[in-house]
Image (cartoon, rainbow, N blue to C red):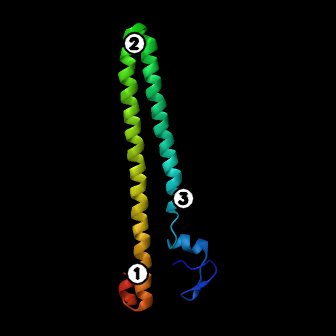
Amino acid sequence: MKTPRGKIKLGRTTSVLWDLLTLEKLMTGSLVHLVYWFGLGIVALAGFAAIGTAVGTALREGGIMGWLLAVPVLVAGTLVVCAMAVLWRSFCEFYVVVVRIGEDLTALRRAAESQGVLPVDVAKT
């Protein structure tokens, strides 16, 4: 359980700046959201490139042969873009899970220290 801001914790006043400088509070949650949307934008650009390639192939070749060449390019490009979006999402989710595991371990360590289960020397290593 987190303590409210400005409350005294272990004999010192907590502040947002101190928490960020000592890595007590991680800013990964908001940062991962920005990275996720940036990566998803790049994947969307790849999708537009696949559509542009298919249309360009169809227009350049002309006639029915151009459209027969464009359809597989469009289908393959769409499938690749969908796979890239799923992989990017799973990568970002994995990163968030790893960070949250670290936060949970920190909370468990603090709880064990406060209950006297772990010696303070072991907890700091």
Report the amino acid beneath label 1. Arg
Q: Is residue 22 left or right of residue 74?
A: right
Of residues 123 and 105, which is closer to you in this image?
105
Distance, label 2 to label 1, CA atoms, is 65 Å
User: Which residue carries the number 2 mark?
Assistant: 66
Relative image position of residue 61 (x, y in whole percent): 41, 10
Instruction: Give the answer, above or below, for where 108 lies relative to 82.
Output: below
Q: Is residue 66 above or below residue 19?
A: above
Secondary element under disc 2, as helix, strand or loop, is: helix
Amino acid type, callout 3: Ser
Q: In the rendered image, which residue does mark 3 sit on?
A: 30
In the figure, 43 relative to 99: above or below?
Answer: above
- Identity of the residue furthest to the bottom in this view: 116
Q: What residue do we see at 49% from left, 34% from top?
A: 45
| First in residue order: circle 1 vs circle 3 | 3
Direction from residue 27 to residue 111 in the image, left or right: left
